[in-house]
Amino acid sequence: MSLAIGGGSTIDVAKAVGILSTNGGRIHDYEGIEKYSKPPLPLIVLPTTAGTGSEVSGSCVITDTEKNLKMSIRHAAFNPASIAILDPLALRTVPAHVAAHSGMDAFVHAFESFLSRLANPVTDAINIRALELIAANIRQFVANRENLQAALNMLCGSALAGITFGQTGLGNVHCMARFVGAYFHLSHGLSNAICLPQVARFNMIANPAKYARVACAMGRPAHGIPQLDAAAMAIEAIDSLCRDLGIPSRLRDVGAEPEVFDEMAELCIKAGYNRWNPRHTTTKDFRSLLDHAY
């Protein structure tokens, strides 16, 4: 039995240690989906951020420092913790910027899982509730981590989204954020938050009906108006949320270098997120998304 107290990175390291303890080898051996067969050590986790949902997800992300890339080790049955304790008191000392970035990671989990090509009525119901909880509480939580009700609601929203995205997969935000974070040494949450607005605009035409539901979940008066107008409200709500949380609006603001965008676009297409992202995306599209985000 092992115990992890910390954010997503800490929990994922504990998962990796548990996998290696029973399966041996190097963690690189298990990159991909269900590449190991022996159950890892039982794990108890106490999250100190509300963001990754790693305590309940089937994913474990580890940085490969040799290749400067992030590896994803996935196993729906074995990767979730045996016991997850969601205690808002554990979030009281989180710095505001960490609360914002990790909270946006949770939002993107719910948003992209809801829009996924593999979404279903059960995951939709869970993700809509996650979006409601996060959108209604993230500002208050970032403003004051002593707000225990907001903190608890963020933990619950994060966990709900963590339950679903392993079933549905994620989309272009997470695809791009993998390489943005690795190339420019940014946290996963910040990488997601910076990429989110441009990807949200790009994907909107693929499923405006679901975007209209996102607008309602984010508190916008989207009922009874044309679908495309309601969908546009979701994008405006996302822009507003990022501004209120102080998310940098451009990749250039965090030290990105456009000289590597061609290489990053190639990596994005090879990552295979078209099986989940609602709009088919080409290498040229990824390069354009990076340019617009820059």
Image (tube, rainbow, N blue to C red):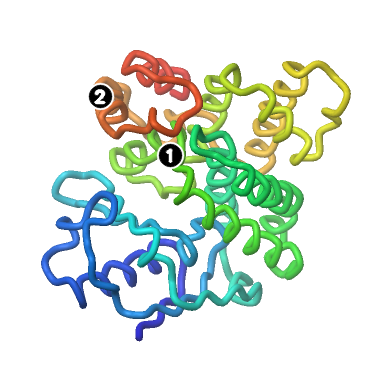
Residue in the image at 23% along x and 66% along y: 37
Identify which residue, 99 or 225, lies in the foreground.
225
Residue in the image at 25% along x and 29% along y: 270
Q: Residue 266: which disc?
A: 2
Near mark 2 (Cα within 10 A), the count class, few <14, some 14-19 or many ≥20, is some
Q: Quadrant of residue 156?
A: bottom right
The x and y percentages for residue 36 are 22, 62
Q: Quadrant of residue 82?
A: bottom left
Identify which residue, 180 or 125, lies in the foreground.
125
Residue in the image at 75% along x and 40% along y: 218
Q: Tell me the quarter of the image containing the N terminus.
A: bottom left
The residue identified by callout 1 is 174
Task: Name, please, the residue furthest toward the bottom.
Answer: 1
The x and y percentages for residue 194 are 50, 35
The x and y percentages for residue 149 are 76, 67
Under circle 1, the secondary element is: helix
Q: Quadrant of residue 124?
A: top right
